[in-house]
C-alpha cells in the first residue's frame, strides 16, 4: 500500500481515511504508527491521553491491513483509529475513572460500545482523561491533572469527556467515545470547537461504563465533522439485552438525510429560556445561524418554555447526587482520601430516597412538558454553553457584568435535553475571544438522523 494523502494523516477524518483504505492508498499500519508517534510527541501538555494501548492498536492495524490486502473490509470503520473515555471498560486495559483508587483496575470484558467498534474493525489507541467519575463539566478534576484546551492551553477543555474532546480537537484521533449525563459530550465539543452528539437515552448501551446516573447517562461520538459523527454512531448504536434502558428498534442509517433539503421543517428557538443565562455576545450569534436555516427554507418560531424550571433542574441534580453516591458509597467509606475534595463534596451532598422518587416523577413530568413544546417544531436551537472556555481551575466567572459560579453558564443550556432524554448535537458556530462557540440542536426522541441533516447543512454554511 502507498500513502498518498493531500494533507497530514492527523488531519484526515473517518470518511477521508475510509476512502483511502478502499482505494488501497493508505495502510492501517502506517496510519496507526504515525498517530501513536504523533500522540507521544504532543500529548503533553494537553494531557488528553492517560494510557496508551500500542500493542493492541498495532495488532488490530495488522489484522485490518491483512483484510484490506485480501480485498475485504469489515465496514467503512475498518482500520479507523479511535479513543475511549476512561470510564468505559476495555478488557485488560487501564480504566481509572480519573481516580487513584482505580489506577490498577483492569476490566475483564469490553463495554458494549467498544465491542461494536472492534467488531467493525476499529483500532483503539488508548484511554482519555476524564473528570473524576465523570462528575464535573470542567475537565480539571482528575487524578492525572487537568486536560488543557488545544485552542488555548490556559483554558478548560470542558468535561467530563475532556480527554476525548481534546484528543479529537488536537488531531490525535479522528474519532472518540465520550459519555453525556448532563452535557459531558456537548460541553467539550463546544469548548474545543468540534462535534459531539448526546444520543437519545438508550440508543447506545451503557453496559461496561462507570455509572453516574443511569436515568440520564448516554454514550456518544465525538468527531471533527458532522458526517463523521453520524458514521460513527451507525456503528455504536444497537440493542443490548444486558442494558435495561437499551432501545429496541429498526436499524437506522444516521447519514441517510444528510444533503437532503431542509425546506418545510420548523426550527424553534427558546430565547426566553437562555437569554439571561448566556453571554450576550453568544446570544447574538444564534440569529446568524437561524438566518441560514431560514434561507434554506425552514420556518422559525419562538418556543416559550415555562419561566420557572428550577424544580426540574433540582430533580436532575438529585438523580445525579443519589445515583453517583450509591454507585461509589463503598469506595467513599473505605477510601475518602482518594477522592478529589470537590468531587467528594458533590457526591456526599446526596438526597433522600423520597427526594429521589420525587425526582423520577419530575423527570417524567418534564419529558411530557418538553414533548408538548416540541409538537410544533422539528428541532430547537440554542447555545451549547453560556460562555466560551473559562480558565482552568476557575470557579467564579463574570457573565454580562455579574459574577457566577463557573459551572452555571457551563451547564445552563445542556441539562434540558439530558433530563428529557432527548438527542442533542453541538457544532461549532463561530469564535469569541479567540475561542470556539458551540451551537446546540435538540431533537425529538430518536431523531438523530434529522439533527445530523440540519447540523451538516449549518456546518457547511457557517464555514
Image (spheres, rainbow, N blue to C red):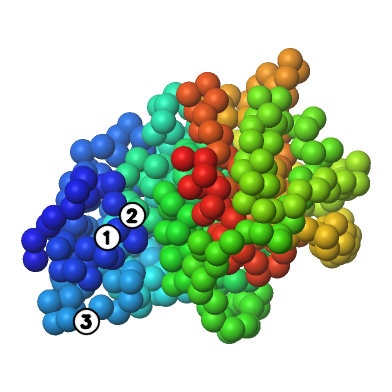
Q: Secondary structure at mark 3?
A: loop
Q: Nearer the viewer, residue 268 or 106?
A: 268
Residue nearer the viewer, 13 or 463: 463
Horizontal side, residue 78 vs residue 55: left or right: right
In the rendered image, residue 378, in percent from the top left (x then y), is placed at 73, 60
Circle 1 — which element?
A: helix
Query: Marks 2 and 3, how far apart in space?
Result: 21 Å
- Residue 203 placement (x, y as % from top left): 60, 71
Relative placement, left or right, of 1 versus 284 is left
At x 18%, y 75%, the residue is: 68
Q: x, y percentage for residue 180?
A: 59, 55
- Please report contact status of discs 1 and 2: CB closer than 8 Å, yes or no: yes
Q: Residue at x 51, y 71 (%)?
A: 256
User: Mark 3 = which residue?
Assistant: 72
- Which residue: 91% across, 41% down? 307
Q: Which numbered disc flags the more N-terminal residue, 2 or 3?
A: 2
Viewer-proximal residue, 162 or 373?
Answer: 373
Task: Judge whether residue 65 can be spotted in this image.
Answer: yes
Tell me what residue is drawn at x 22 percent, y 71 percent. Answer: 22
Q: Which mark is residue 133?
A: none
Mark 2 highlights which residue? 13
Amino acid at each position: 500500500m502507498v500513502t498518498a494523502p493531500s494533507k497530514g494523516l492527523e488531519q484526515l477524518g473517518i470518511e477521508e481515511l475510509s476512502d483511502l483504505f478502499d482505494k488501497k492508498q493508505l495502510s492501517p499500519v502506517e496510519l496507526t504508527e504515525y498517530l501513536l508517534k504523533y500522540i507521544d510527541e504532543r500529548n503533553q501538555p494537553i494531557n488528553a491521553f492517560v494510557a496508551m494501548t500500542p500493542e493492541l492498536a498495532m495488532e488490530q492495524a495488522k489484522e485490518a491491513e491483512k483484510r484490506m490486502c485480501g480485498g475485504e473490509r469489515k465496514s467503512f470503520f475498518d482500520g479507523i483509529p479511535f479513543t475511549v473515555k476512561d470510564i468505559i471498560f476495555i478488557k485488560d486495559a487501564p480504566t481509572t475513572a480519573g481516580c487513584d483508587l482505580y489506577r490498577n483496575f483492569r476490566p475483564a470484558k469490553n463495554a458494549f460500545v467498544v465491542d461494536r467498534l472492534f467488531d467493525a474493525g476499529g483500532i483503539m489507541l488508548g484511554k482519555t482523561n476524564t473528570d473524576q467519575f465523570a462528575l464535573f463539566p470542567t475537565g480539571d478534576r482528575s487524578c492525572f491533572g487537568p486536560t488543557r484546551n488545544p485552542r488555548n492551553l490556559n483554558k478548560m477543555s470542558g468535561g467530563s469527556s475532556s480527554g476525548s474532546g481534546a484528543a479529537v480537537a488536537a488531531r490525535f484521533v479522528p474519532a472518540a467515545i465520550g459519555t453525556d449525563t448532563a452535557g459531558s459530550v456537548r460541553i467539550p465539543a463546544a469548548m474545543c470547537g468540534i462535534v459531539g452528539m448526546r444520543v437519545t437515552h438508550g440508543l447506545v448501551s451503557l453496559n461496561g461504563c462507570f455509572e453516574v446516573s443511569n436515568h440520564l447517562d448516554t454514550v456518544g461520538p465525538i468527531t471533527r465533522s458532522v458526517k463523521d459523527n453520524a458514521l460513527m454512531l451507525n456503528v455504536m448504536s444497537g440493542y443490548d439485552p444486558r442494558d435495561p434502558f437499551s432501545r429496541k428498534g429498526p436499524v437506522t442509517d444516521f447519514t441517510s438525510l444528510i444533503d437532503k433539503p431542509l425546506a418545510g421543517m420548523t426550527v424553534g428557538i427558546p430565547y426566553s429560556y437562555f437569554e439571561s443565562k448566556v453571554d450576550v455576545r453568544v446570544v447574538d450569534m444564534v440569529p446568524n445561524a437561524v438566518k441560514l436555516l431560514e434561507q434554506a427554507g425552514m420556518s422559525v418560531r419562538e418556543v416559550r418554555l415555562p419561566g420557572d424550571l428550577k424544580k426540574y433542574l433540582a430533580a436532575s441534580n438529585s438523580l445525579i447526587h443519589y445515583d453517583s453516591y450509591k454507585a461509589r458509597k463503598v469506595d467513599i467509606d473505605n477510601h475518602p482520601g482518594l477522592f478529589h475534595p470537590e468531587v467528594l463534596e458533590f457526591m456526599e451532598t446526596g438526597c433522600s430516597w423520597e427526594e429521589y422518587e420525587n425526582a423520577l416523577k419530575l423527570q417524567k413530568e418534564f419529558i411530557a412538558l418538553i414533548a408538548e413544546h416540541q409538537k410544533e417544531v422539528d428541532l430547537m436551537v440554542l447555545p451549547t454553553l453560556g460562555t466560551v472556555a473559562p480558565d482552568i481551575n476557575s470557579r467564579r466567572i463574570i457573565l454580562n457584568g455579574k459574577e457566577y459560579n463557573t459551572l452555571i453558564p457551563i451547564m445552563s443550556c445542556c441539562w434540558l435535553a439530558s433530563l428529557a432524554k432527548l438527542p442533542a448535537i453541538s457544532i461549532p458556530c463561530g469564535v469569541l475571544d479567540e475561542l470556539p462557540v458551540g451551537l446546540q440542536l435538540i431533537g425529538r426522541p430518536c431523531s438523530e438522523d434529522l439533527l445530523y441533516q440540519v447540523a451538516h447543512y449549518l456546518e457547511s454554511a457557517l464555514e
